[in-house]
Amino acid sequence: MATIKDTIIFTDGACKGNPGRGGWGAVLNYDGKQKILQGNDPKTTNNRMELLAAIKGLEAAPPDRPVTLYSDSTYLVNTMNKGWKRKVNHDLWEQLDQLCQRYRIDWKWVKAHNGTPGNELADSIASNQANLA
C-alpha cells in the first residue's frame, strides 16, 4: 500500500501499427505535485514503449523513497513480478534492471480504459505522442 512519502507512477505505451509509430507517457505524483513525461519513436513496438515509459518514469523519480508503479501492461508487470522470460528488448530490460537497484518498487497492474485517472492520463499522453511520431 502506497503512503504519502511514496512516489506513485502511472505509465503507458502506445503504438500505431506494431511495429509502427509509438509513444509513451509517465505520470509521477510525489510531494503533492505531478510531473508529466512523454516521448515518441517513429518506428517501434508497443512493448518497447511500455518499457520505456517505466524507465523514464523511474529515472525522474526522487531518490531514496519507495515507488509504486502502475501499468496496464501485463508484459511489464508480470515480467517484474512473476519472472516471465525476457525474449526481446534486452537493452531496455537491462536499463530497467539497473533502475530497480536504486528503488524499492511495488509493480501494480491496472486494467486499461477502466477509469483509473492516472492510467487514463498516461494512456492519453502515449496515444498523442504516437500520433506525433
Image (spheres, rainbow, N blue to C red):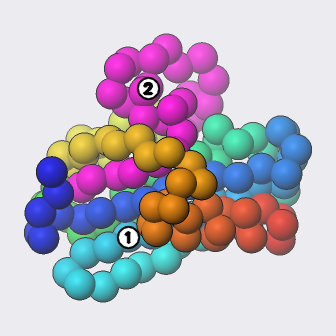
Q: Is residue 59 visible?
A: no
Tell me the kind of residue under disc 1: Leu
Tag 2–tag 1 contact (CB < 8 Å): no
The quadrant of the image that shows the C terminus is bottom right
Q: Is residue 10 visible?
A: yes
**Residue marked by disc 2:** 79
Q: Secondary structure at mark 1?
A: strand
Magenta residues? Answer: 67-92
Label whose residue precedes the other's in the sequence (2 or 1):
1
Please give the name of the residue rendered at 70% of the width and 52% of the height, measured from the top-left corner: 14
Q: In terms of secondary structure, where does tag 2 sit?
A: helix
Residue 42 shown in magenta: no
Q: Residue furthest front?
A: 114
- How many numbered dots are placed on residues in this image? 2
Instruction: Please tell me the numbered disc located at residue 28.
Output: 1
Image side of residue 11 versus residue 124, left or right: left
Locate residue 9, reporting x and y percent: 37, 61
Say which residue appears at 56% left-offset and 35% top-offset. 91
Rendering coords of residue 36 (x, y %)? 49, 77
| Left or right: where 115 falls relative to 49 | left
User: Badge 1: how crowded within 10 Å, few (<14), some, or many (20+)?
Assistant: many
Residue beneath the point at 33% across and 27% down = 81
- Looking at this view, name the residue that lies furthest to the bottom: 33
Q: Which amino acid does the dot numbered 2 rest on?
A: Thr
- Tell me where residue 127 sits by quadrant: bottom right
